Amino acid sequence: MVRDLSTTLCDVELDNPVVPASGTFGFGAEMADIYDINCLGSISVKGTTREARFGNPTPRIAECSSGLINSVGLQNPGIDTVISHELPHLRKIFRKPIIANISGFSIEEYVECCSKIDKEEQVEIIEVNVSCPNVHNGGMAFGTSAESAAAVTAAVKAVTTKPVFIKLSPNVTDIVSIARACEEAGADGLTLINTMLGMRIDIARRRPVIANKMGGFSGRAIFPIAVRMVYQVANACHIPIMGCGGVATAEDVIEMMMAGASAVQVGAENLRNPFACKQIIDSLPEVMERLGIERLRDIIGVVK
Amino acid sequence: MKQVVFEVISNRQLTDSVYQMELAGNTEAITAPGQFVELSVEGLFLRRPISVCNYDDGKLTLIYKVVGKGTKQMAELSVGAKIDTLTGLGNGFNDSIECNAPLLVGGGVGVPPLYRLARNLIAKGKSVTVVLGFNTASEIFYKEEFETLGANVVVATADGSYGIKGFVTDAIKEADIKSDLFYSCGPLPMLKALCSTLDIDGQISLEERMGCGFGICMGCSIQTASGAKRVCKEGPVFGKEEILW
């Protein structure tokens, strides 16, 4: 039997639910050198801000049990260069819809970047990152209160025509209230979760491993937290969810979808296994067969 | 970049903390001395980046220092063990730069990538001088191997227990080494001292803590004279003039 892997995010049809998460796949070029990335459902490209950013000092990476902490700090070439250089190149190597990921330090910056990226034909979904833990006075600050997350959502929705997904932070006491506020402010979908704020200490040197002291913890270790948050939000909201956090296998994709995700992002796993997304997609039909799943979209939110 | 499962042929101790591992497997993706590989180590999330010491058809030589969990596990691997590896990472040294008497300077565990570079340069008929810097005599490794290649080898130890007492910069001065191009890999203070004291062109290999090792995570970015660069992708080797000290 042919297994149907397709899924839908708002009106955007994806061949399969597997999407590399922003910041773990660049703008596709490095990965296209090692396999045909057209097997992916879509790509959430590197988080983009108005100005070019170098990001935080190094070390930016700390190994953890079943994951890593990063404090890259939104290094990116800026929205104009992304539009003039990165997206045209991506168009040549990837023929499917892409997800643009936008970050900012003020509502005005989110608005400006989103209105620019909205005009890009290949961009079919705009993912608004209100949850980066690695920058001060922006990023996560917007995603940790319902009011500010809603304010960003409403402002961005006013200047865009494409579906807007708000990428939420897990570093909150009540993810549901923030998700609901975004939905009420007009969000078309939600991505959850971004990284968890974490820290490691070099006990020989008695100082933090990461130059910026703290960073975002991701990887397999956070999968149960991501599943829980997707489940909670899916049961409280009526907009589609991209599940993200610790996904490493086809089974994880299915679990995340059963929790309520319509598509599933793979992040940290790409850093240790560059073939992770492809391998997950390749093994999905077999796992579906084993579990008696004919159409992947049938399992979205089946767990109540 | 290529993913290859290598098999351990030998894994032996060179000094108290430095090991040499020989691996069998496809080395086609390695195209320049100074490139690195990333080894997957059981139970650890990220791969371990290790510079390539030498490579031939079907055989790879790595030298690594045991500094943490990952390298400790590597040291415990037996002959026949399989290692999931990404090979051919980074740019490597340019061994085709016009020169007559290249100077290769290695500090501690920065020595290994210079081995294949020396081999290539000697094969091109260059008169190669290698300066190796270590803290103390018991840490010295690969001196004979460089000599066997045909390089003129000078050793410096910080405590004076072997060769010239002092740093590699002291050794270069004391041995009165004449050179028209240098290549180096080692601790940052050493690289900085070299770049500021040698008034010839040079290429240096940098080290930075990495996430992916193949250019997608921006974990190892540095600022250079020509903008932000990834140590794992545009590096690890940079021209001396690129570095903003």
Image: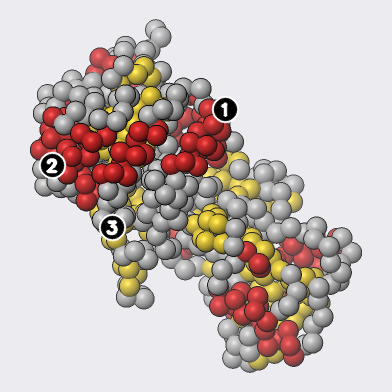
Residue lying at the far right of the rendered structure: B125
Mark sitting on residue A136: 3
Establish if A97 lies above or below A191.
above
How far across and down, in percent of the image, does residue B93 sit?
A: 70, 59
Alpha carbon of mark 1 to alpha carbon of mark 3: how far?
35 Å
Name the chain under label 2. A
Question: Residue B4 versus residue B123: which sits nearer the camera?
Answer: B123
Classify mark 1: helix, strand or loop. helix
Q: Is residue B165 left or right of residue A39?
A: right
Residue type indicated by callout 2: Ala
Classify mark 3: helix, strand or loop. loop
How far across and down, in percent of the image, does residue B83 sit?
A: 54, 48
Mark sitting on residue A92: 1
Residue type indicated by callout 1: Lys
Name the chain under label 3. A
Residue indicated by mark 2? A146
Alpha carbon of mark 2 to alpha carbon of mark 3: how far?
18 Å
